[in-house]
Amino acid sequence: MTATATLSSKFQISIPKAVREQQHWEAGQEFVFIPKGKGVLVMPVPELEQLAGIAKGAKKDGYRDREDRY
């Protein structure tokens, strides 16, 4: 799917309807902007319920914490 949008004079972009429908994005949803080279990755911020179990099976040893940093 190829969709384009134009940046307005108020620095706003409307997400094309086809993209919103495919991704199931809704009004009021929060997004994060992640710089990637010359572009930006736009992703919805997940709800807390969506994160449950995401680290299942992760090792509990060998991780770094704040005390490891200088």
Image (spheres, helix red, strand yellow):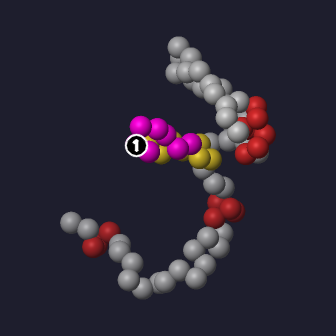
In the image, what residue occupies the spot 76% across and 31% down?
17
Few, some or many residues within 10 Å of mark 1 (<14, 14–19, 20+): few
**Residue 8 position in % (x across, y down):** 56, 17
Q: Farthest residue in the front direction?
A: 2
Q: Is residue 40 above or below residue 58?
A: above
**Residue 20 position in % (x across, y down):** 73, 38
**Residue 50 position in % (x across, y down):** 68, 62
Q: Which residue is mark 1?
A: 37
Q: Is residue 17 above or below residue 29?
A: above
Q: Is residue 49 above or below residue 28?
A: below
In which quadrant of the rendered image does the C terminus lie?
Answer: bottom left
What is the magenta range? 36-42
Q: Farthest residue in the top direction?
A: 9
In the image, what residue occupies the spot 71% across and 30% down?
16
Residue 26 seen in render = no
Residue 58 lies left or right of residue 48; in this view the side is left
Which amino acid lies under the numbered mark 1 shown in the image of this protein? Gly
Number of numbered labels in the structure image: 1
Q: Is residue 40 magenta?
A: yes
Residue 17 lies left or right of residue 59; in this view the side is right
In which quadrant of the rendered image does the N terminus lie?
Answer: top right
SS state under label 1:
loop
Q: Is residue 66 above or below residue 44?
A: below
Q: Main secondary structure of the magenta part?
A: strand
Q: Nearer the viewer, residue 2 or 60?
A: 2
